[in-house]
Amino acid sequence: MAQMKSSRPYLLRALYEWILDNNCTPYLLVNAGYPETVVPQNFVEDGQIVLNVSPSAVRQLEMDNDRVTFDGRFGGVPQQVWLPVQSVMAIYARENGQGMVFEIEPVNPPEPPEGGEKGGEKKPDAKPATARPSLKVVK
């Protein structure tokens, strides 16, 4: 049986439209520490960032099966944001909290080259592992 693609990007796009159709403001909760995630670091708290992705807050929003990208202003400074779809932890309406929380995606380490690493040698550009942020329920 063929493995199906992730449903996350399809659900993200559908929920985004649903939130807008209900005249609400779509927010994304993002794991800012996920590889290849580009967000304004001075707005990250506990490894996470909440982003307003309403049409009035962002420009050139694109949601494809691999990433979410847009141009936004943070503290008056323009910045381009790149989010791997797997970094999006939740999408919800600001006004009532309705939306969806996604399963945390594991970060798979890159495959070693054929033949593997020899004699336990360490690659010079290896980076130390960082702690993964966790989603908190606020009541």
Image (cartoon, rainbow, N blue to C red):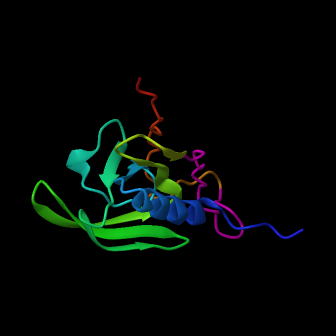
Q: Residue furthest front?
A: 22
In the image, is residue 2 above or below residue 28?
below
Q: Position of residue 23 (x, y in %)?
A: 36, 57
In the image, is residue 116 above or below residue 34?
below
In depth, the one of 126 and 129 nearer the eye is 129
In depth, the one of 123 and 112 nearer the eye is 112
Q: Position of residue 32 (x, y in %)?
A: 38, 49
Q: Is residue 110 magenta?
A: yes
Q: Residue furthest right?
A: 1
The reply, left or right, for residue 7 in relation to residue 4 is left
Q: Is residue 103 magenta?
A: yes
- Residue 60 in view here: yes
Q: Which residues are magenta?
A: 101-118
In depth, the one of 88 and 129 nearer the eye is 88
Q: Position of residue 73 (x, y in %)?
A: 17, 62
Q: Quadrant of the N terminus?
A: bottom right
Q: Residue at x 56, y 71 (%)?
A: 65
Q: Residue at x 24, y 62 (%)?
A: 57
